[in-house]
Amino acid sequence: MGDHHVEGHQAQRGAISRLVAELPASGIRRFFELLDSVEGVISLAVGQPDFPTPAQVTRAGADSMLAGNTAYTSNYGLLELRELLSRQLERLYGVSYSPQRELLLTTGVSEALDLAVRAIADPGDEILVPEPGYVAYEPVIRLAGATYVPVPTTAASRFMVTADAMRERLTPATKAILLGYPSNPTGAVLDRASLLSIAQFAEEHDLLVISDEVYDRLIYGVEHVCFASLPGMRERTILLGGFSKAYAMTGWRLGYAAATPAILEAMMKVHQYVMMSAPTAAQYAAIEALRSGEEDVRGMVAEYDRRRRMVHGRLLGMGLPTVEPLGAFYAFPDISSTGLDDVAFAEQFLVEERVAVVPGSTFGQSGQGYIRLCYAAAYDDLVEAMDRLERFLARHRGTAAK
């Protein structure tokens, strides 16, 4: 019986794709299993707005289904939505895309990212990625057979990647840059000068740029510069965006990609086989979001800003060095003064104080010694979480001193 079990286990292992078998599981899997076992948790772990989708947007999605609009749309998505999206990108950033040939609606920005990498990368191609960075970037690149090349950033540079840092990691195999700003997990926003420097670097070395701008509307007191709007960059950029964060539509699963016709058609080749089309009801909801959701976006951003300022101030007051987050809805404090590594910190904070945060090392080696906390939670919950953090720090710093 035991031998049969071993043989069966080996056979199963041999049946798994090498790419998938070698892909490490998420660094927070064990952490989230632990989360399930603790009651009464304040979760600052998931990057999800605590606001519901604006009511008129939800109604538009529901009405579309009741009206019988439940079939596939065009592979590209509803033309009306692409036209509205094209006008919004022009209005916000001065960059123009043809609704018919240069915009593709996807099942979340996650699919858009996957399509972008698969459309441009051959096995052995290298993609430069600022780190700490979103947890899906490395797996998506590796699953496409390409090579993930992290470009470390530090608190000293406010987690802003530089062209010089990329140049140090440039090889003949470098094919593209993957930018994710405003940043998950650090909240960093690249200023225009930094982006122009990266644009010049991309042009000099004929690199493509995948620019994940899903947090473009969530910025505080600074300018969001759309990478594709920079001189000469529209032709070499795949712009990714979506509705999840700005319009509180995470569960609707709707994103988009904007690129030149040749690149977009390559992405479409994959999209039409693996996804067919983005969710139909979500597309009708998004039409309403673009038509009438601007006031809702402004209201949510103002509230995130209130929470951001409170959380940042409390963290600094506790003696946790924290680069001011200027975008998205995350803070990324340095917790090394506790003597705990980031994984142990997150686990003990959860068990002892029932607050969930994410270890910084989940987002790459550059994140070691940090934690990510999401301030999209309710304000009162954030105040309570900060009180619990203060209590936790007092206890553990005292222990470390002994």
Image: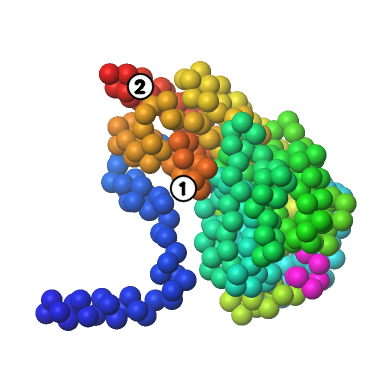
Examine the rendering and report whether any part of residue 188 can be seen.
yes
Taking the spot 72% from the left edge, 40% from the top edge, the residue there is 190
Along the line of sight, which residue is nearer the eye, 145 or 387? 145
**Mark identifier at residue 92:** none
Crowding near the residue tagged with mark 1, few <14, some 14–19, many ≥20 C-alpha atoms within 10 Å: many
Report the number of discs. Answer: 2
Q: What is the three-letter code of the residue carrying label 1? A: Thr
In the structure shown, which secondary structural element does the residue marked by tag 2 occupy?
Answer: helix
Q: Is residue 22 left or right of residue 149?
A: left
In the structure shown, which secondary structural element does the residue marked by tag 1 occupy?
Answer: helix
Taking the spot 38% from the left edge, 53% from the top edge, the residue there is 29
Q: Is residue 263 magenta?
A: yes
Q: Is residue 193 magenta?
A: no
Callout 2–callout 1 Cβ contact below 8 Å: no
Examine the rendering and report whether any part of residue 282 can be seen.
no
When the figure is inspected, residue 183 is found, relative to residue 401, above or below; the finding is: below
Label located before the other in sequence (2 or 1)? 1
Quadrant location of the N terminus in the rendered image: bottom left
- Residue 313 is situated, as x and y percent measured from the top left of the image, at 56, 22
| Residue wearing tag 1 | 362
| Residue wearing tag 2 | 397
First to last magenta residue range: 259-264
Q: CA distance from mark 2 to mark 1?
A: 24 Å
- Residue 378 is situated, as x and y percent measured from the top left of the image, at 51, 34
Q: What is the three-letter code of the residue carrying label 2? A: Arg
